[in-house]
Image: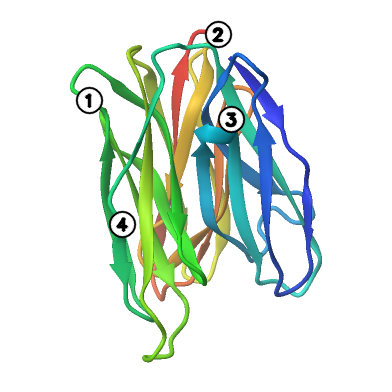
Amino acid sequence: MTQEPGHPIILYPGGEGTATAYCPQGTKPTGGGATVESDPLAAVFFRESAPNPARNRWQVQAYNGSNEVQTVHPRVICTTDSTITYNVGPDSSIQPGDFNSAPGAGCSNSQYVVGGGVQAGPRTFVMESSWANIRAWYAVAKYTDYDPDAPLSYVRGFAICSDRQPTLKVGSTKLAAGAVGTAHAECPAGQVPTGGGGSIGLDALLNGSAPTATGWTVQGTNKADGPRTLDASVFCTTP
């Protein structure tokens, strides 16, 4: 199990771009994400953080909603586990100005979810990308085009599955209305992350979600008029 950084992308205010991190030959992606170097809690939001098995990489699409230039750093977790499979859940449509959850992308009855990802349409940003149960991954996104005549958007989830059962750990933090913050989930001693994700709840968005050497950290912005709980989840295994 290794972690590989990708090439960072620079986003100017109002800009959007795609960042990728590749696994070495002979390995496969099991998880990944991105962090924002310039300001980890800046208004940088994500509409994709998902595996691309055909190109052996993890890819992230980010939008810079802040007034400053921001640098986004992608990262991928890679494994030699030959039992890894990838499953894509069905799309859920989203009305302008609304949010929706994607039906879970599932593993077979003999496999366990070890990571997952999310994709959404233009101007549609991730609220949640996390485990639904030991065999499924779910995703939730908010469509920020409020024009009632705008076309429908969508969100879909990805489940990354393995025959090997991982250890799941969760960490949480409370965010007041209008607050930004981080949550972290740490693997048990001697274990490393295979994948992870985060959730923040209604009218709130994730600013980042990525592995550390021994866990998973998420950032979030609470745009709601009340408190929200920011959760980080990590799936762990022995190296």
Amino acid type assigned to the residue bearing label 3 in the image: Asn
Q: Amino acid at mark 2?
A: Pro
Helix, strand or loop under label 3: loop
Location of mark 1 (residue):
108
Gap in angstroms between the C-alphas marked 2 and 1: 24 Å
Residue 239 occupies which quadrant of the picture?
A: top right
Q: Amino acid at mark 1?
A: Ser
Distance between mark 4 and mark 1 Cα atoms: 19 Å
Of labels 4 and 3, earlier in sequence is 3
What SS does tag 4 mark?
loop
Q: Earlier in the sequence, mark 2 or mark 4?
A: 4
Q: Position of residue 234 (x, y in %)?
A: 45, 30
Would residue 231 be seen by someone viewing this image from the given angle? Answer: no
The residue pinned by badge 3 equals: 56
Label of residue 6 in the image: none
> How far apart are the alpha carbons under marks 2 and 4?
34 Å
Residue under pointer 4? 91
Q: In the figure, 150 relative to 84: above or below? A: below
| In-front residue for pair 168/81 | 81
Amino acid type, mark 4: Asp
